Amino acid sequence: MWYTRIRNEKGEFMFYSLTTDIAYTTTKKQIIQFASEHGCTLTEFQKNGPAGGNHVCTFKSNNYDYIEELTHQLNLPSSKIKQL
């Protein structure tokens, strides 16, 4: 499988993040498993979000292709991916 791991000027691997809301009916354990299955980690979790609705989740990966696949699975545009 082809995947992209990009290094910065210092030779360090770059990281990517994605913040989105996830249905409030989904458990944190399910979200962690979902992230793991796509080569990502759940780095932030706000239960029921700021307005008391869906959870707000931030995912992180050092592989752009993995986090891009996560966006596809969540029906989100790749433009939501942030480079860290």
Image (cartoon, rainbow, N blue to C red):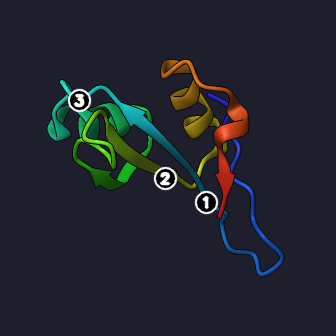
Rendering coords of residue 72 (x, y %): 58, 21
Q: Are marks 3 and 1 in contact (CB under 8 Å)?
A: no
Q: Are marks 2 and 1 in contact (CB under 8 Å)?
A: yes
> Disc 2 to disc 3, how far (Cα)?
20 Å
Tell us which disc is closer to us: 3 or 1. 3
Tell us which disc is closer to us: 2 or 3. 3
Relative to 14, say whether 63 is above or below. above
How would you rate the neighbour count of disc 1 (Cα within 10 Å): few for under 14, some for 14-19, many for 20 or more? some
Task: Please state which of residues 75 and 12 is positioned toward the viewer in this rendering.
Answer: 75
Q: Residue at x 52, y 51 (%)?
A: 61
How would you rate the neighbour count of disc 2 (Cα within 10 Å): few for under 14, some for 14-19, many for 20 or more? many
Q: Which image quadrant for residue 81?
A: top right
Q: Earlier in the sequence, mark 3 or mark 1?
A: 1
Which three-letter amino acid code belongs to the residue tagged 2?
Lys
Residue located beneath label 3 in the image: 24
Which three-letter amino acid code belongs to the residue tagged 3?
Tyr
Q: Quadrant of the C terminus?
A: bottom right
57 left or right of 25?
Answer: right
Q: Earlier in the sequence, mark 2 or mark 3?
A: 3
80 left or right of 69?
Answer: right
Rendering coords of residue 67 (x, y %): 56, 39
> Disc 2 to disc 1, how far (Cα)?
7 Å
> Disc 3 to disc 1, how far (Cα)?
27 Å
Q: Residue at x 47, y 39 (%)?
A: 20
Residue 15, numbered circle:
1
Which three-letter amino acid code belongs to the residue tagged 1?
Phe
Q: Residue at x 43, y 44 (%)?
A: 40
Residue 60, numbered circle:
2
Relative to 81, say whether 69 is above or below. above
